[in-house]
Amino acid sequence: ARVFTMPRWWLLLLPAMLATSMSAAGMILQAGTGRVPPLSLHAKSVSTTQTLLYMEAQCKRPCGLQSVLVSTFATECCRSSRIFMAVEAPTESSDFPGPLSATEQMARAATFWTRVFPVLTSYLQVYFAIQFRERLLGQCLDEEECELTWSAQHERGADVVAKVIQDLKGFYVKTGQIIASREDLFPKQYTERLAGLTDLLDPMPVSLVKAVISQELLHDGEAFSDVFAEFDDEPLGAASVAQVHRAVLTEAYGGGEVAVKVQRPAIESKLMGDVAAIKALAKSVRGVDVIPVDYYLVFTEIEAQLAEEFDFVKEASAMERIGDALCLDADGAPRTPPLVTPRPVSGLVSKRVLVMDYLKGEPLSRAVEAMRERGIDPSGPEGQIFGRRLLSALTEAFGMTILGSGFFHADPHPGNIFVLDDGRIGLIDFGQVKQISGRARATLSKIMVALADRVSDTAPAELEKISKLALELGVKLKPGTPAEGPAATAMWLFDGSVKQLPGGFDLGELSANSPVAVLESFPQDLVLVGRSTVLIKGVASRLNITWSLAQQWAPIARRVLKPSLRRTDGRLRLRTVLRLFKQWFLAKADAAFLRLPPPMRRVAAAWTLRISRARTRRAEQHRQTLAPST
């Protein structure tokens, strides 16, 4: 463990783990040295056999194992490519890029694999070199030398992964976004190198952007300038599906600053082909004991959600629905939303263009840099206060939507979360949303309450109750798993304050003894719920803040399980008025805090942080005093 601090079974997972990066296990070591040139297939139709022969001939470094893996992978990709070509509609204009052909999709997937796979051999070379020195030569590396060796390997791997993603783009960008958001799971070389993928990548030329807008929004005889008084040539952000520009509407359309989201022409076939390629890898390793999660199930759910992301009319509807849910409490009374969400502009929404409110701020991926520019130390009291406010906003918003309505934002990553200029937190990009059933919401709520109300992490009665609820939710564990397995899984996923898991499980997500390792299957409807919780856990870990989702979601869960009767006479209750006044006061206090001179702001932040920590300690002490009584 001193020489190679990561479990050896990771080495078996490296190729599949990078491609199926929705889960953290094994992805640290994935990269590629990519000396195999990309395929250049130009034929309109090609058989699988011909493709494999071509790929074999193009391989500059023949390797029997590599040839077998690439051949199997290409076969699956070829099938997927043909399916997508069968349903792809022709482009509407010859000026727009056309969809990828079947051979282009297959070549693209094979290029990814052939460039990523060689990194496995590079990691294996380092590993076996260390083993050879230790076991055969008796030369034992000290911890510092070992750390330097692996750090250099991570640097090389991170550079290759970033280059592959930047070259291929498409859905692989989302892979990089996930890695960049999980500092708790990946070496800093990977997270830092991929951080730039979250908000700006390969922008379309503005001429193409305006052509799409003109085709989608303008009426006959209407000019671009009749709708937009200003339109920035430089995009605010460019993602895999679309890019966004700031603009100002003319008075005829209401005026004011807006954000204009424009879909990349013919992008659907590329992204769906990328997902099909990743699913092919996940399917090939499905059921392997050393792989802790059913990645095929994960990407099947993502594929279904991604198919909805290409219709901006649906996204506008989802944006309105989630915005309304965050602005109303359980009684239906108005409240200050925990997150700011944009609203679509009526009359300026189509399938490929969405005009919405403009949120002025910085994406979370650049928050640390922005704080330093303002003279704020990210690790100081002000940074800690910001971190807690960020966690509170995300936790409350996702708790309200997941447990409250069951309809929630399903694609959270640092590029979609904004720190606004006024200090509030914003959430954008509602292309991927998910609706879970009322039964699932009720069971999730019961789990949150059971976790929050428990007074011990080892009491058999409490663990049995939590385990039954987890099994009722649809979680299935491998045969022979300890009886505490379901409870340990729930505690690991929803309670970051736990110090030790029951049943002898490890807290480390990448440990071979993690609750993730004993999961046989996870309910498909809740895969994206897990993605949201993983995001919040990752933010908490990055900020070094102990955070329990169960404790924070328990009040919402209790309201879901015991809904209050809403008033129908149109009158406001006194408690509603008081709650609104409290929210108004806190908003004013936050604004006043931001206007303080930096020295005074640091002092105020230090006192606020001290009070918050004292409350947390008292709550923990109270919980510990109750534990012996059980």
Image (spheres, helix red, strand yellow):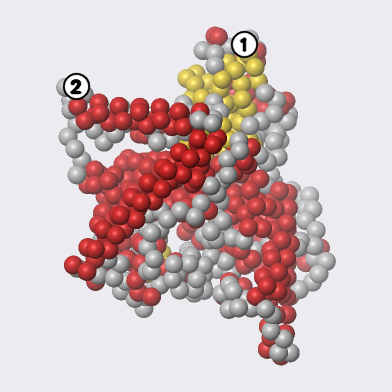
Up the image or down, 17 lies above or below 306; here it is below
Left or right: 539 as drawn, with respect to 504: right
Q: Amino acid at mark 1?
A: Asp
* In this view, 91 is above or below 139: above
Residue 65, position as x, y percentages in the image = 70, 74
User: Which type of secondary structure does the marked residue at label 1 adopt?
Assistant: helix
**Marked residue nearer the N-terminal end (2 or 1):** 1
Residue 226's tag is 1
* Amino acid under disc 2: Arg
Q: Is residue 604 above or below residue 132?
A: above
Image height of 127 relative to 280, above or below? below
Q: Nearer the viewer, mark 2 or mark 1?
A: 2
The quadrant of the image that shows the C terminus is bottom left
Give the residue pinned by disc 2.
571
Residue at x 62%, y 11% (from the top left corner): 226
3D distance between C-alphas at marks 2 and 1 = 44 Å
Quarter where residue 376 is shown = top right
Residue 192 drawn at (x, y percent) = 65, 52
Q: Position of residue 513 (x, y in %)?
A: 45, 73
When asked about the image quadrant of residue 39, the answer is: bottom right
Would you call the spot at circle 1 few (<14 residues within 10 Å), some (14-19), or many (20 or more)?
some
Q: Is residue 37 left or right of residue 568?
A: right
Do the residues under discs 2 and 1 have CB atoms within 8 angstroms?
no
The quadrant of the rendering that contains the N terminus is: bottom right
Residue 345 screen position, x and y as percent: 49, 21
Mark 2 neighbour density, 10 Å: few (under 14) some (14–19) many (20 or more): few
Which residue is rendered at x = 67% and y = 27% of the image?
209
